[in-house]
Amino acid sequence: MSKLSEYYEQIKDCKRCHLYSGRINLVFGEVNENADLMFVGEAPGYHEDQQGRPFVGAAGKTLNELLAEIGLKREDVYITNIIKSRPPNNRDPLPEEIEACKPYLMEQIKIIKPKIIATLGAHATKTMLNKNVSISKVHGQSFKGNGFTIIPIFHTAAALYRRQTLELLKDDFKKLKELLKEDPIPEIPKEDEREQGQQGSLF
């Protein structure tokens, strides 16, 4: 059994926040545990809760299509969310729910050791950068973490309603492709910079 599978077994019955009472499945993440590129979304929706898999609805279809445009398949990357249980009626996750689930995400990152983490949408971006930022202002930019690069992009669900957002997503995916080609070795922020949040990372 892989480290991620073992970790899933440890947390699959999590009750760290009240969301456990309404979920069908804890949605942990998939697929490539050795991926250089990791996507971090917001929270499971209806289809994800039903299947126990991330990004399997319409937003997931868009993600798969965007990956195909840069020559990647779903099986080439790892996909997860900042919280693992579906919020009621797909509402935004609450700060206390994010804090309860954050250790799980951090452990996933520690195990996978991705080179690039693409944060999908505002909540994932704010969580990973540990800053209150606007996704429309920071999308496509690179932020240094401890051993990886964080690139905020729009959530693929937003592209379902706005053609303009889809075009922006396509541009940002091209940047992901170029970074993967470069085989980046990100700089580790200095201790004082991490403390002050100047690098915009939790690490």
Image: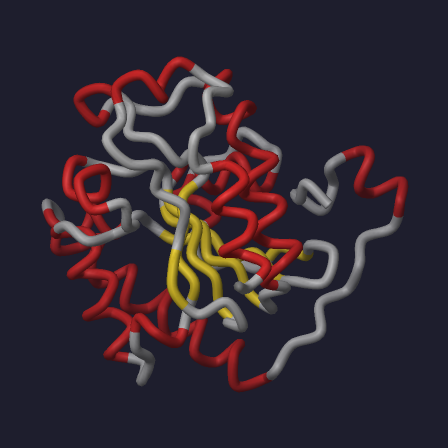
* Left or right of 45, for residue 33: right
Q: In percent of the image, x 17 and y 40: which residue is there?
A: 50
Q: Quadrant of residue 174?
A: bottom left
> Can you give x and y, in whole percent of width and height, for residue 54 in the image?
30, 50
Q: Nearer the viewer, residue 55 or 169?
A: 55
Q: Nearer the viewer, residue 14 or 84?
A: 14
Q: Nearer the viewer, residue 169 or 98?
A: 98
Looking at the image, the residue that sits furthest to the front is 1
Residue 96, relative to residue 36: is it above or below?
above
* Quadrant position of the C terminus in the picture: top right
* Left or right of 177, for residue 24: left
Q: In percent of the image, x 46 and y 20: which residue is there?
A: 15
Residue 65, relative to residue 57: is it above or below?
below
> Can you give x and y, in whole percent of width and height, for residue 53 in the image?
28, 50
> Can you give x and y, in whole percent of width and height, for residue 52 in the image?
27, 45
Q: In percent of the image, x 61 and y 35: which residue is there?
A: 103
Q: Nearer the viewer, residue 67 or 88?
A: 88
Q: Quadrant of residue 100?
A: top right
Residue 101, relative to residue 116: is it above or below?
above
Q: In percent of the image, x 40 and y 43: which residue is there?
A: 81
The answer to whether residue 7 is seen in the rendering is yes
* Left or right of 93, for residue 103: right
